[in-house]
Amino acid sequence: MEKTDKLYLLWTSGEKITFDEMVFMYALNSIKRHWWKEVTLIIWGASAHLVETDQEVRNKLKVLFDAGVQISACKGCADNLKVTDLLEKLGVEVKYWGVPLTELLHADEKILTI
């Protein structure tokens, strides 16, 4: 079986300390220290609200972008929370993630849910 070098971080928590002390640190170090070749951060649910309400979180997302982390968000959640425009202005890919996430799970891809 071929080893995959892609990691998907499914970020659903709206807690800032969880973003600062896990999501941000692990995503950044995963790229900088070459633990994973590709890292995709998926913003889903409460995390989208945190992005909207916290400038420091938005600044750290830019750091992740600059390091090479791919960032995407669930369109359904973003639309429901009325943050789609903000996420897109930040450069976040906004798309429906239900089917792609299901496909990743069926393919046994590496997904870390926070």
Image: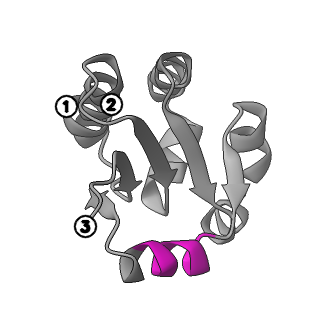
Q: Nearer the viewer, mark 1 or mark 3?
A: 3
Q: Amino acid at mark 3?
A: Met
User: Where is mark 2, residue-wise?
Assistant: 24
User: Where is mark 1, residue-wise?
Assistant: 21
Number of on-image labels: 3
Q: Secondary structure at mark 1?
A: helix
The label on residue 1 is 3
Closer to the N terminus: mark 2 or mark 3? Answer: 3
As measured in the structure, the alpha-carbon distance from the residue carrying label 2 to the one carrying label 3 is 30 Å
Q: Secondary structure at mark 2?
A: helix
Report the span colored magenta: 97-104
Closer to the N terminus: mark 1 or mark 3? Answer: 3
37 in the magenta segment: no
Q: Is residue 78 above or below residue 14?
A: below
103 in the magenta segment: yes
Q: Is residue 28 above or below residue 85?
A: above
Quadrant where the image shows the N terminus: bottom left
**Residue 83 in sight in this render:** no
Label 2 Cα crowd, 10 Å radius (few <14 / some 14-19 / many 20+): some
- Most frequent secondary structure within the magenta stretch: helix
Q: Is residue 34 left or right of residue 92?
A: left
When asked about the image quadrant of residue 86, the answer is: top right
Which residue is painted at 50% across and 52% down in the image?
A: 43
Which residue is at the front of the view, 68 or 4? 4
Which residue is painted at 59% across and 80% down in the image?
A: 99
Task: Residue 91 in the image: state x and y as whole percent.
Answer: 71, 33
Q: Secondary structure at mark 3?
A: loop
Q: Is residue 93 left or right of residue 63?
A: right
Which residue is at the front of the view, 46 or 103? 103
Q: Amino acid at mark 2?
A: Phe
